[in-house]
Image (tube, rainbow, N blue to C red):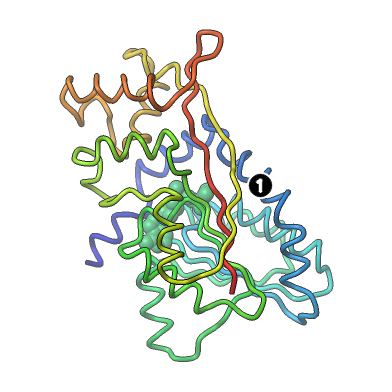
Amino acid sequence: MAAEAKHTCYEGCSVSSFQFYLEKSGEHAAILKCVHSLLPEEFKRIGAGKSSLDVLGIGSGGGEMDMQMLSLLQSTFPAVPITADVVEGSSALVNNFKAKTADLPKISFSWHVMHSEEYEKQVKAKGDIKKFDFIHMIQMIYYVDNMAETIKFCHSLLKNNGRLMIIVEAANSGWDILWKTYKKDLCVDSIKEYRSSGEVIACLKSLGLKYEEHPVPNSYDATECFDPNSTTGGRLLSFMTGTDNFYESFTPEIRAGMLDLIRNKCSTEKDGRVFWNSHLSCILVYA
Ligand SMILES: C[S@@+](CC[C@H](N)C(=O)[O-])C[C@H]1O[C@@H](n2cnc3c(N)ncnc32)[C@H](O)[C@@H]1O
């Protein structure tokens, strides 16, 4: 199991593929907009009257979003000591994250370079459980072995008034439609079961947890995906299908079917360009 779970963490060419995707998709800008509209009030409420604040990031990647949220928290409570624990299985991305932390010298970081299942095991074995005011999982819930167990565990780590923030692709977004339609061809490697906000909400309901959901609109220009000679198109398609190389991973019939679906069911056309629907959802789970 450990070897399989480790495979979900980005190493080697998945790191560059992910970075390329971030440059092209505008995803971080969309998430940041949501963070800046929701978190100032959330942080004021979470931190009211507290003499220290503890944040846990799970699947933080290169930490771009973490740094923004931590900086917002610090500016909301400049005199309160803040700790940040990071659980991220990719050592390459953790190194990228570490290189950014000099910008927040007052925050004390602890690094857990492992997958979340291993962190859970270690925390439970140790007994002395550190609790958190704010826990976030941004675009990573697809990769955990057992979503309900992971959410239950994270929820159990919340302090009084804390919040667990989960950001995932929205139900009926392009990702959701593509991955569910081509489940048999796509859910074969690091993602065995595609989860969008629909599955996360169903899981929260079954666990009896209180939550609120906020839309995070995003779309990006996927026109080049339809040009077989475009390197950008090929790289985007590879990331969107979770493969190293879209053109080498599927038969011509399956590729044609996916491209048709992407254009006609997962996108909108404007001025001759095809915009892939990459709407996300931000779910805040109450302690
Ligand atoms: C799509 S990236 C998102 C990174 C970051 N949250 C962001 O939005 O920029 C998913 C991240 O989750 C990490 N990951 C995947 N499976 C994991 C697991 N089981 N435990 C911890 N991290 C995991 C990957 O290494 C990768 O950095």
Q: Is residue 178 left or right of residue 139?
A: left
Quadrant of residue 18 in the image? top left
Q: Position of residue 146 (x, y in %)?
A: 32, 65
Residue at the limit of the structure toward the right, as seen here: 79
Q: Quarter of the image holding residue 151? A: bottom left
**Quadrant of the rendered structure where residue 270 is?**
top right
- Label 1 secondary element: helix
Mark yes or no: residue 236 visible. yes
Against 85, residue 274 (above or below) is: above
Give the amino acid at mark 1: Cys
| Disc 1 Cβ-to-ligand 1 distance below 8 Å | no
Q: Position of residue 286 (x, y in %)?
A: 59, 69
Q: Quadrant of the N terminus?
A: bottom left
Given residues 139 and 213, the one toward you in this image is 213
Q: Is residue 91 visible?
A: no
246 w.r.t. 40: above or below: above
Q: Where is mark 1, residue-wise?
A: 34
Image quarter hosting the C terminus: bottom right
At x 67% / y 51%, what residue is drawn? Answer: 35
**Going 33% across and 48% down the picture, which residue do you hit?**
194
Q: Tell me: 254 left or right of 96.
A: left
| Residue located 23% across and 62% down the image | 3
Picture quadrant of ligand 1: bottom left
Q: Residue furthest bottom?
A: 127
Tell me where residue 36 appears, x and y as whole percent: 72, 49
Please count the marks in the image: 1
**Above or below 19: residue 80:** below
Image x and y of residue 145, in percent: 30, 63
